[in-house]
Image (spheres, rainbow, N blue to C red):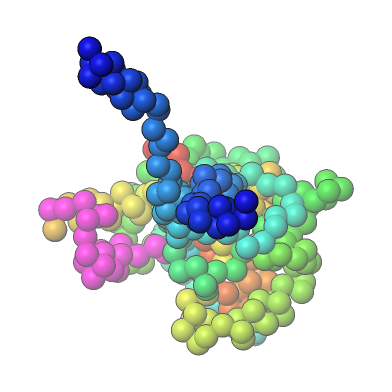
Amino acid sequence: MFRKRFRQQIPELNTTSTADISFMLLIFFLVTSSMDTDKGLLRQMAPPPVENSQPQDVNKDLVIRVELDAHDQLTCDGKPVTLQELSEAVVSMATVNRTEHIVAVQADRETTYEAYFRMQDAIVAAYHQLREQYSQKHYGKAYRQLTSEERSLVNEYYPQRISEGKSE
Amino acid sequence: MRAMKSLIRGDRRRHGVPTLNVASMPDLIFTVLFFFMIVTHMRSDEVKVRLEVPAGSEVKKLTGHPAIINIYIGKDKSSQWAVQLNGEMVSPSELPARVNAIRSKLSPENAERLTVSFRADRHAPMGLVSDVKQALQQAYALKINYSATEISP
């Protein structure tokens, strides 16, 4: 009886379940990992103010004062505006005074972050529009198709001059 | 006649359904698995606050993974506004020291590129956001990425 069994061929290993095991691994990775990439608005802050420094005097004609109050009301130079109007105001100011203008931003402590973010987004959109125009005119291409050197030249031509005030 | 019979019988015997060879199936699935392991990344820290990021039209992709600090601002379990730095809850006053500690562990190259990924809830008050921003300013972490979802303009 034994002898007979030994004479038989070695049976193949049943690997049917390996697929199931690897499927389980795959599903585990699908669940635990995230595909979403971080997207956002990249901003550069000013370095901390030096102590005892005097506030610089700037020409008031070159400043757009953008304010947000406690009820998320956006005002531009004292007048209530919409995001679209804010964008337009920034565009017209930056066209007139390309390198000298200042967008002074001020938000109340009670303002919601969303209102603040939308304001930032509108200002960045304004600069984006200007840069897009410039790149179409001088390179004949869309801004996003420029090489990184060309892009930094365009960025220098239309610098983002945003100054942020403390929330009080 | 006999030959005919055997032919039929032989035919019949061959009619048994052959088993499908699934030996390469695990290899296939492993390939898919490796693909997913490469293109996705594990979320390194557990977010302890509830938040919903705002939406904007000018958002861009954030790159440079090793040099990113995550800050989350949202409501904690007791519905209070709270700040989380990477995996831990912090108060805005201790942020500069924490950020400096993280920076000192990075390579000089990455320390220069250090970016703060700022995920704050839509309804977070600017007072708190501004406190956090000032703390970051003191720590010279000046590059900030305001995380948002994209909406088409």
Asked if A147 appears above or below A4 in the picture, the reply is below
Q: Residue furthest front?
A: B2
B65 and B126: which is toward the camera: B65
- The span picked out in magenta is A140-168
The answer to whether residue B107 of the structure is visible from this angle is: yes
Count of labels shown? 0
Q: Please determine whether, in this image, residue B118 is positioned above or below residue B99.
A: above
| Residue B47 is one of the magenta-drawn residues | no
Relative image position of residue B128 (x, y in whole percent): 72, 58
On the rendered image, what quadrant is the C terminus of chain B found in? Answer: top left
Q: Is residue B4 left or right of residue B13?
A: left
Seen at 87% across and 48% down, the residue is B78
To which quarter of the image does residue B90 belong?
bottom right
Residue nearer the viewer, B88 or A76: B88
Residue drawn at (42%, 35%) of the image: B19
**Which quadrant would residue A55 be assigned to in this image?**
bottom right
Could you tell whether A81 is left or right of B18 in the image?
right
